[in-house]
């Protein structure tokens, strides 16, 4: 399928067309050297003028991934209304998250107060996909622990089906024996499980995982 944008003219494509036209001319190109140099400078400016803007976006997303919602994007000076619309939207989202998201360190502090500092809090959505994990999992690296975000809880708890069966029967899930299996190593844990309910709607599930020493 032909690219629908292939025939659209842009400032850079116009410069390229002009340069092609010059190069096709017969004669001494040395006479066009200054002209070609100016065109190259213009093309270079146009191709790189958004680099700083894109770096701002990248820095913001990295900060958000680290639970830092204090950053704000500056409005762009190039007068691009669409990009400034995106800037406004991202700043609004960041401000909302700053007031609603609880940083994992807050949960960790609470667990220390409750004298269970090594407990791992896992929150899933109503389908069992892990949305929050407060702490790195003991015996595993932080990177491996974080890799479970977005995966189903059954990929973390090896005998999840047994736990779910007890829960579905209406049993109160407390100190349920389970284990985490990673690269052939078994880490035995106990699990408490509760349903997070908003009104009559199940929003997800909360798991408190303690390692058995």
Image: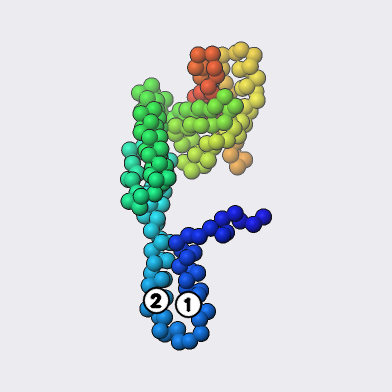
Nearer-the-camera pick, 204 or 26: 26
Residue depicted at 32% across the width and 51% down the height: 77
Q: Is residue 13 above or below residue 22?
A: above
User: Mark 1 or mark 2, which is nearer the start of the sequence?
Assistant: 1
Residue depicted at 53% across the width and 40% down the height: 147
Label 2–label 1 contact, CB within 8 A: yes
The x, y position of residue 26, in whole percent, is: 51, 85
The x, y position of residue 17, in whole percent, is: 50, 69
- Structural distance between the alpha carbons of marks 2 and 1: 9 Å
The answer to which image quadrant residue 153 occupies is top right
The residue where tag 2 is placed is: 35
Work out which quarter of the rendered image holds the N terminus and state it: bottom right
Q: On the picture, is 159 further left or further right than 113?
A: right
Residue 22 disc label? 1
Residue 82 disc label? none
Q: SS for tag 1?
A: helix
Residue depicted at 38% across the width and 58% down the height: 49
The x, y position of residue 140, in whole percent, is: 50, 40
Residue depicted at 38% across the width and 31% down the height: 96
Q: Residue furthest bottom?
A: 28
Disc 2 packing (10 Å; few <14; some 14–19; many ≥20): few
Q: How many marks?
A: 2
Give the colouring mode of the picture. rainbow
Nearer-the-camera pick, 31 or 101: 31
Q: On the picture, is 150 further left or further right than 88?
A: right
């Amino acid at each position: 399928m032909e690219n629908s944008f292939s025939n659209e003219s842009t400032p850079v494509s116009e410069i390229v067309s002009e340069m092609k036209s010059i190069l096709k001319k017969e004669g001494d190109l040395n006479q066009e050297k200054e002209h070609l140099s100016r065109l190259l400078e213009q093309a270079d400016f146009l191709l790189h003028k958004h680099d700083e803007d894109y770096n701002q976006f990248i820095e913001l997303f990295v900060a958000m991934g680290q639970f830092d919602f204090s950053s704000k994007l500056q409005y762009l000076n190039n007068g691009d209304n669409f990009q400034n619309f995106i800037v406004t939207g991202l700043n609004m989202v960041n401000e909302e998250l700053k007031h609603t998201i609880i940083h994992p360190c807050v949960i960790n502090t609470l667990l220390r107060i409750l004298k269970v500092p090594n407990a791992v809090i896992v929150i899933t959505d109503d389908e069992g996909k892990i949305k929050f994990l407060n702490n790195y999992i003991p015996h595993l690296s932080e990177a491996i622990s974080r890799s479970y975000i977005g995966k189903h809880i059954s990929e973390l708890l090896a005998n999840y089906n047994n736990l779910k069966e007890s829960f579905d029967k209406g049993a109160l899930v407390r100190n349920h024996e389970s284990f985490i299996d990673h690269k052939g190593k078994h880490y035995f844990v106990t699990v408490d499980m509760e349903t997070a309910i908003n009104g009559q709607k199940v929003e997800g599930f909360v798991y408190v995982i303690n390692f058995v020493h």
